[in-house]
């Protein structure tokens, strides 16, 4: 039983989403607390590689109640700088965060929610789940057939090239993490193979501004969720954007990364790949061209004075491809010592024990982050409402909406 009695709300998770909601709850004088299993911004501290930088410019990496007035609005923080920002934010606004408290179960009875931890059980009228929808690595089922040989790790466990055993590295997955990790490895002088996928990509900058600035100005970040979710509920991958500069499959190949098609599975102990590499490169080019065309049209329609388009080297460089597609890899022959799985993430919501809140895959059932059970909210979900959702840019409006509904219930 909480010594604070029944709270208006309990927030689970002290990342940017949970802290943003806490700020709004505090502004409304709502009695609440934030429970965090580790430290503030724990995932940013422990699930990012050493050279990691935000994809979101500083001017948009702003928490509710704050504003950016620094010297580098279109620069990018490191993950440690962002964790430090969250700590400072918590201190400045005196948010009620309890570190080192793991929630083991969420139950509902007697019209209240019971948030169970090893230390005590908290009771609240509302619960905001901000534990992250992209914090548990996901590998294809066929990956588990690779039981012997190379060290295997997920993108969230990769730190730097020196931590991996001597030999070549196979990176599987070419979205944000996979492509950036492949570049990190090749720049460190490691022989690198990259299994690609049907992933769009964007230039880092275009016509004098960062691509995210254009996405905001043109309204692309506000495209609705329905545009990215297929009938099965699977959410499309975000296009690849290099953290500090444009990355393309062809630019990676020009640096020496050996490109492969999509990972299909394992046959006779060897990973096998589709013969779709050329199509994957083409798809990235097409998505980039579509975005740039929309930006061009917006600039012309708005009468803006913007520099003329200049094709970046990373997009213009010709791909260096193997003479014949590599459809299987003999891991021993290629001296591959490690495999880095960059095949996506999902949230771990197994601790939620309230019927109707999770689907058969254990993921949230929601409409714009609001669960079908009154009083449960999911903050920070990727693509919860729009393309903006799942980024710091979305949390102020999302938190204000949730707190408005919580106020109406109390």
Image (cartoon, grey):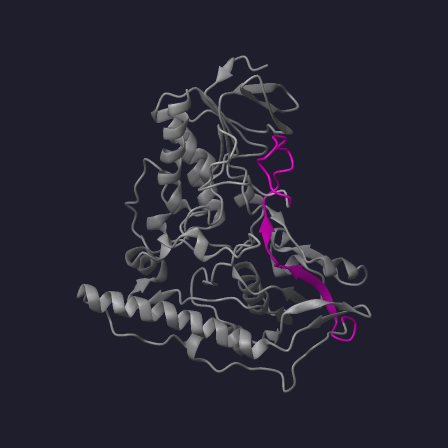
Q: Percent from the top left, x then y, of residue 185?
A: 59, 65
Q: Percent from the top left, x then y, of residue 203?
A: 40, 67
Image quarter where the N terminus lies is top right
Nearest the eye: 111 or 131: 111
- Residue name at image x 46 percent, y 22 percent: 32
**Residue 342 inside the magenta-drawn segment:** yes
Nearest the eye: 86 or 134: 134
- Residue name at image x 72 percent, y 61 percent: 165
Describe residue 341's horizontal placement relative to residue 386 as left or right. right
Q: Percent from the top left, x then y, of residue 128?
A: 49, 31
Q: Is residue 271 above or below residue 409?
A: below
Image quarter where the C terminus lies is top left
Q: Which residues are magenta?
A: 331-360
Describe residue 269's horizontal placement relative to residue 96 as left or right. right
Residue farthest toward the front in the current orientation of the protein: 231
Q: Quadrant of residue 244?
A: bottom left
- Is residue 30 visible in the rendered image? The answer is yes
Describe residue 277's horizontal placement relative to residue 209 as left or right. right
């Amino acid at each position: 039983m909480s010594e604070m009695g029944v709270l208006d709300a309990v927030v689970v998770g002290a990342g940017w989403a949970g802290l943003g909601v806490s700020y709004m709850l505090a502004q409304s004088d709502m009695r609440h607390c934030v429970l965090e299993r580790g430290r503030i911004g724990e995932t940013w501290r422990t699930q990012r590689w050493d050279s990691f930088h935000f994809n979101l410019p500083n001017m948009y990496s702003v928490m509710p109640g704050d504003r950016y007035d620094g010297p580098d609005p279109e620069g990018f923080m490191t993950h440690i700088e962002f964790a430090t920002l969250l700590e400072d934010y918590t201190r400045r606004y005196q948010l009620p965060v309890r570190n080192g408290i793991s929630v083991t179960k969420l139950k509902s009875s007697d019209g209240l929610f019971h948030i169970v931890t090893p230390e005590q059980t908290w009771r609240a009228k509302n619960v905001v789940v901000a534990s992250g929808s992209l914090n548990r690595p996901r590998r294809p089922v066929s990956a588990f057939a690779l039981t012997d040989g190379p060290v295997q790790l997920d993108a969230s466990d990769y730190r730097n090239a020196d931590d991996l055993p001597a030999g070549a590295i196979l990176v599987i997955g070419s979205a944000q993490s996979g492509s950036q990790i492949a570049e990190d490895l090749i720049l460190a002088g490691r022989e690198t193979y990259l299994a690609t996928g049907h992933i769009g990509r964007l230039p880092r900058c275009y016509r004098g501004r960062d691509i995210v600035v254009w996405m905001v100005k043109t309204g692309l970040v506000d495209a609705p969720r329905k545009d990215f979710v297929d009938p099965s509920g699977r959410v499309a991958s975000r296009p690849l954007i290099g953290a500090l500069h444009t990355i393309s499959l062809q630019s990676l190949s020009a640096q020496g990364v050996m490109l492969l098609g999509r990972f299909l599975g394992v046959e006779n102990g060897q990973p096998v790949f589709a013969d779709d590499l050329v199509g994957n490169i083409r798809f990235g080019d097409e998505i980039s061209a579509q975005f740039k065309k929309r930006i061009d049209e917006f600039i012309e329609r708005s009468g803006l004075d913007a520099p003329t388009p200049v094709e970046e080297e990373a997009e213009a460089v010709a791909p260096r491809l193997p003479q014949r597609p590599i459809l299987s890899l003999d891991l021993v022959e290629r001296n591959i010592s490690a495999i880095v799985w960059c095949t996506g993430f999902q949230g771990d919501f197994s601790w939620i024990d309230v019927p109707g809140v999770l689907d058969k895959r254990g993921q949230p059932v929601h409409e714009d982050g609001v669960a079908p059970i009154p009083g449960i909210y999911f903050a920070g979900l990727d693509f919860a409402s729009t393309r903006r959702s799942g980024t710091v840019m979305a949390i102020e409006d999302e938190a204000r909406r949730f707190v408005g509904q919580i106020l109406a219930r109390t």
